[in-house]
Amino acid sequence: MSIHLDYPKKQAKHQGECWDRFPVHVISFIVYIASVLIVCGTRAYKCACSSFITCKRGWRQLTIVLDDAGIGDLLFGVVIGAFRCETQEFRYDILDVKYFRYPRFRSKEYLKQASKVVFQLLDKLELKKDEQIQICRGYIFDEAVNLLKETYGDSKIDRIIVTGEPQRLTEIAYLDEIRNLGYEPVKERDEKKAKSFFHMMNWLKKNPEKLIYAKTGWPRLQRYNLFRSYCQKRSTDE
């Protein structure tokens, strides 16, 4: 014995007739509203997720990068810059040229002063509890790194080769400072260090009153009459 199930066709017809009762423009409007709600809901969800990820990353991955500029240049002191990557905040301070002149240069007072400047910059940026510190490998930061590790722990301090925006901004700050002296640096200064050195020295010959802004503590400078005479004169005056 077989049983044949036959669904009433009237019901299907009745369901179709329900939609037929609505004008076409009403149905289009309902479809449009549904689409808008779906799109807006999706965007709101993505926005919420994005905000959560950003906050999470900001909380876990804030980093301050410290770099220097001018350490190998004849003119002016040294600029030390601090850059917070996530917020693009930048601060800098100056390591005075007097630390690169006799007798301070010989006793390496610049190392202690550089450490002091580093901590001052971190205070200005209000270093966060879980913030990482990345610092240039240059010897100018050797004492600062030791003190940073003692203060914040080894895991928070990384020595790196600084590139990108932190390097660019620190370099710009140094160039601005030497331009304030009336000196215009050579192009591609980092790639042509020898040319830059002699360019600065020739400028000092023409502007001897600016010798007070030169790093005359370098022993190798004594081979040049300009600096030898200047240092002898200062020793006599003092």
Image: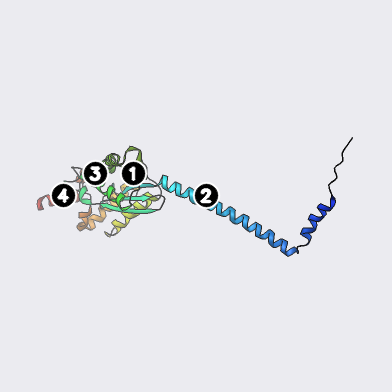
Return the disc, 1 or 2, that comes first in the chain's sequence: 2
Instruction: Say if mark 2 contacts mark 4, CB within 8 Å.
Output: no
Q: CA distance from mark 4 to mark 3?
A: 23 Å
Q: Which circle's residue, 4 or 3, is located before the other in the chain?
A: 3
* Residue indicated by mark 1: 135
Name the foreground residue: 198 vs 167.
Answer: 167
In this picture the colour scheme is rainbow
Disc 3 on helix, strand or loop? helix
Q: What's the mark number on residue 49?
A: 2
In the displayed structure image, the side of residue 70 where residue 32 appears, left or right: right
Q: Nearer the viewer, residue 106 or 48?
A: 48
Answer with mark 4 or mark 1, whichever residue precedes in sequence. 1
What amino acid is at disc 4? Cys
Q: CA distance from mark 2 to mark 4?
A: 64 Å
Point out the frontmost of discs 2 and 4: 2
Instruction: Return the mark for residue 231.
Output: 4
Side of 17 relative to 115 (left or right):
right
Look at mark 3 in the image and give the residue it sits on. Answer: 111
Image marks 2 and 3: residues in contact by CB distance under 8 Å: no
**Disc 4 on helix, strand or loop?**
helix
Question: What percent of the width, then of the height, locates residue 4?
Answer: 87, 41
Q: Earlier in the sequence, mark 2 or mark 4?
A: 2
Tag 1: amino acid? Ile
Q: Nearer the viewer, residue 53 or 34?
A: 34
Amino acid type at image mark 3? Leu
Amino acid at dot 2: Cys
Mark 2 or 3: in front is 2
